[in-house]
């Protein structure tokens, strides 16, 4: 459905995108995972034709997308990172404006407005001013605006920024429903739990480069260490920390330690046998399976939350 080939974008001396290559299939829920400033929004803006790339191309449904070609854009819905609504107008008035941008009018537009407001559970508030909406409601209305023209591809650029957990879950459920109905979704985030919960496949992007692509299992298989030990920090465990140095690398956190076993303890059964030999209280130990965060740190060497 969407193929990105050798895409590059510079802002002066800053290389925002470096030779990006992606191939996204119809019906996928595809994630772009990376910290702020990684290049996610720049890539989105090029896909929708708001920005031009310096080189490379984007092919959507066998047509090349450019800033001057709008035929493909009618099949693309965009949910921007920032709230893009007229605060003094009602939800209905906002959607009328966005609908007319896609040449929708008359009774058909009224019907589509009711449909999308019902979908995002805001139909009863359609006459209310957006300025009186909560952050989560505004986010959902932003999504509604992107759906009026029934796009095949929906681009979501960090659509849960600044919303409460209940609103975040409502947005997740909505996007998963749309995807189950056949919509292709591209979702940018720097939250690991969102990517793990939503996405069929992921691309890890940092400093404008794609570091890895795959589903969660294949990405985790890229790293050598699949399991860690998580040890609760208390008086019963702290006295053993010097002994644990022979087990592997130790990282201290506020409330716990993490031990990355060395090659001698590739079998966890041996590790727990040796913990028992030194008298370590095993009730304070848990196995932590490798996660998307571990993949990201392994690939980029820095936190997702930068």
Image: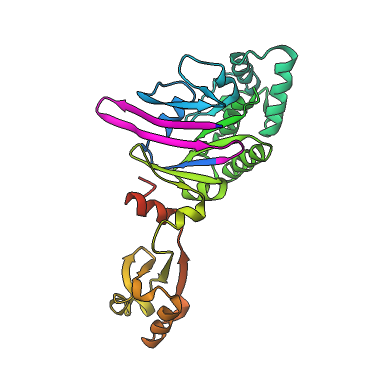
Does 62 sit above or below residue 178? above
Report whether 168 appears left or right of 188. Answer: right
Pick the residue in front: 62 or 240: 62
Report whether 114 appears left or right of 290. Answer: right
Q: Residue at x 45, y 58 (%)?
A: 221
User: Where's residue 108, x and y in %?
Assistant: 73, 16
Magenta span: chief secondary structure: strand
Locate the N terminus and report the quarter of the image it occupies.
top right
In which quadrant of the rendered view does residue 247 lie? bottom left
Report whether 212 appears left or right of 143. Answer: left
Does 110 sit above or below residue 42? above
In the image, farthest residue toward the front: 62
Does 209 sit above or below residue 226? above
Q: Magenta stretch containing residue 3, yes or no?
A: yes
In which quadrant of the rendered view does residue 167 lie? top right
Q: Magenta stretch containing residue 267, yes or no?
A: no
The chosen color scheme is: rainbow
Look at the image and give the residue range highlighted in magenta. 2-29
User: Where's residue 206, x and y in %?
Assistant: 36, 41
* Residue 77 makes an appearance in the image: yes
Does 284 sit above or below residue 227? below
User: Where's residue 82, x and y in %?
Assistant: 47, 29
* Residue 158 makes an appearance in the image: no
In which quadrant of the rendered view does residue 143 lie? top right
């Amino acid at each position: 459905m969407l193929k990105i080939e050798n895409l590059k974008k510079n802002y002066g001396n800053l290389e925002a995108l470096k030779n990006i290559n992606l191939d996204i299939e119809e019906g996928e829920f595809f994630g772009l995972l990376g910290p702020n400033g990684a290049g996610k929004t720049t890539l989105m803006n090029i896909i929708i034709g708001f920005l031009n790339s310096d080189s490379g191309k984007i092919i959507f449904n066998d047509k090349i997308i450019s800033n001057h070609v709008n035929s493909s854009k009618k099949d693309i819905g965009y949910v921007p990172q920032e709230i893009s609504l007229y605060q003094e107008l009602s939800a209905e008035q906002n959607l009328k404006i966005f609908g007319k941008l896609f040449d929708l009018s008359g009774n058909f537009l009224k019907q589509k407005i009711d449909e999308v407001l019902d979908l995002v559970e805001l139909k009863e508030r359609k006459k209310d001013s957006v300025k009186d909406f909560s952050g989560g409601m505004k986010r959902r209305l932003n999504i509604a605006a992107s759906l009026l023209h029934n796009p095949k591809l929906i681009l979501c650029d960090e659509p849960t920024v600044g919303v409460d957990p209940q609103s975040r879950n409502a947005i997740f459920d909505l996007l998963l429903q749309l995807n189950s109905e056949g919509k292709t979704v591209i979702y940018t985030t720097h939250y690991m739990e969102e990517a793990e919960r939503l996405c069929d496949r992921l691309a890890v992007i940092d400093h404008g480069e794609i570091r890895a692509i795959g589903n969660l299992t294949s990405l985790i298989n890229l790293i050598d260490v699949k399991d860690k030990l998580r040890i609760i920090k208390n008086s019963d465990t702290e006295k053993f920390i010097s002994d644990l140095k022979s087990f592997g690398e130790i990282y201290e956190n506020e409330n716990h330690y993490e031990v990355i076993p060395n090659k001698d303890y590739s079998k966890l059964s041996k590790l727990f046998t040796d913990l028992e030999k030194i008298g370590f209280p095993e009730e304070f130990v848990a196995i932590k399976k490798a996660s998307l965060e571990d993949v990201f740190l392994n690939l980029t060497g820095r936190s997702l939350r930068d």
